[in-house]
Amino acid sequence: MYHRPAFMLSTSHSTIMSGPRHDDDFHIFTTLRVGSNLLSDTAHTALCDGRKSDVYLLPYHFDRLKTAAARLAGFHCPEAMLSIESFRKYIQNAVEHSDAELSEQPSPYNNAKQAFVRRGKISWWPSGQVEITLLEVPQSLPSLLPSSFDDISVPLWSAVLDDQPTKTSVYTEIKTSHREAYDRARQGARLDPKSTTEVLLYNANGDIIDGSITTVYFHRHNKWVTPQHNCLEGTTRRFALETGLCSIAESAVRSDSLREGETIWLSNAFRGFFTATFHTRKLSA
């Protein structure tokens, strides 16, 4: 049965929902960056199958969601996920709704051309419900498509090790609403959404698996590597591997191999790629 998409807007925050509501809140999701500057980036257009897109790595998000739904099984496919084109149109429709509402509502961005980008989230429930949320945030100029990890800028972020191992499962490999391990790690490190510190998760063997909100990259044996097992198959991780920025570590990156002051790379689908300095965590007794 077709359900007309609902549209809700609060200040700088818009949500479009389609499909029947699902009582169980378990869902898969992907986080997006939407910015008009990507439309003129020829390298990004090439990554998007030759189609200009203001969604950072758009095809990678589609593939990620489809792969996750297939692996978990039991997910009904909504119209928005039938094809890459329907996915593209679904996001564009949400952006156009957001633009229309922003022009009518008081906003710090109304009179500032390209002064903001959108942080988005697309959620998909087993019932076939799909939801996109867009949040306007101040414009930033991150490194979205770096050509090398060897061009290291002064790190603006820090990284610390989690204070306990994380039990690995399908939920550390697929991005779902089951986020307990990541939430616990961030709470243990006393991080909030505005923190510029990342906490690195490791498994029971002491092997690094991921960051709480990022993919992680380490310089080992004269090359940049990313963990081989139990990590999220992120969109920026895929970009880094496919473009040769890094390779999958041939052996585990041990938590006890990290050194005070070591520079590492981090990435996610909103902030792009950035460096961080690892610091030995001082734990309270």
Image (tube, grey):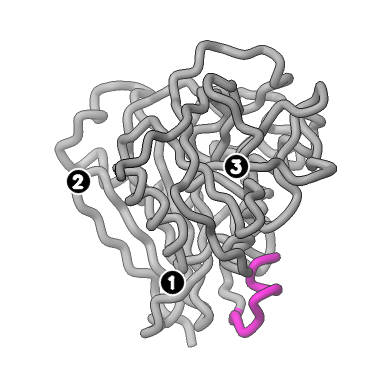
Q: Nearer the viewer, mark 3 or mark 2?
A: 3
Residue 236, which numbered label? none
Q: Which residue is mark 1?
A: 18
Identify whether 243 is placed above or below 27.
Answer: above
Residue 12 % position (x, y): 25, 43
How many angstroms separate mark 1 from mark 2 (CA)?
Answer: 21 Å
Task: Tell me the crowding category of disc 1: few under 14, some 14 to 19, or many 20 or more residues within 10 angstroms, Cα based.
Answer: many
* Magenta-drawn stretch contains 106: no
Q: Residue, x 24% and y 23% (percent of image)?
A: 111
Upstream in sequence: badge 1 or badge 3: 1
Q: Which residue is mark 3?
A: 215
Task: Tell me the crowding category of disc 2: few under 14, some 14 to 19, or many 20 or more residues within 10 angstroms, Cα based.
Answer: few
Upstream in sequence: badge 1 or badge 2: 2
Q: Secondary structure at mark 3?
A: strand
Q: Residue, x 20% and y 29% (percent of image)?
A: 108
Q: Which residue is mark 2?
A: 11
Upstream in sequence: badge 3 or badge 2: 2
Task: Tell me the crowding category of disc 3: few under 14, some 14 to 19, or many 20 or more residues within 10 angstroms, Cα based.
Answer: many
Q: Secondary structure at mark 2?
A: loop
Q: Residue, x 40% and y 83% (percent of image)?
A: 24
Residue 267 % position (x, y): 57, 35
The answer to which of 266 and 243 lies nearer the viewer is 266
Residue 124 % position (x, y): 51, 69
Identify whether 190 is placed above or below 172.
Answer: above
Quarter occupied by the C terminus: top left
Give the residue type that dot 3 points to. Thr
Magenta region, residue range = 67-76
Query: Relative to 173, is 250 on the left or the right?
Result: right
Residue 258 % position (x, y): 61, 32
How many angstroms separate mark 1 from mark 3 (CA)?
Answer: 30 Å
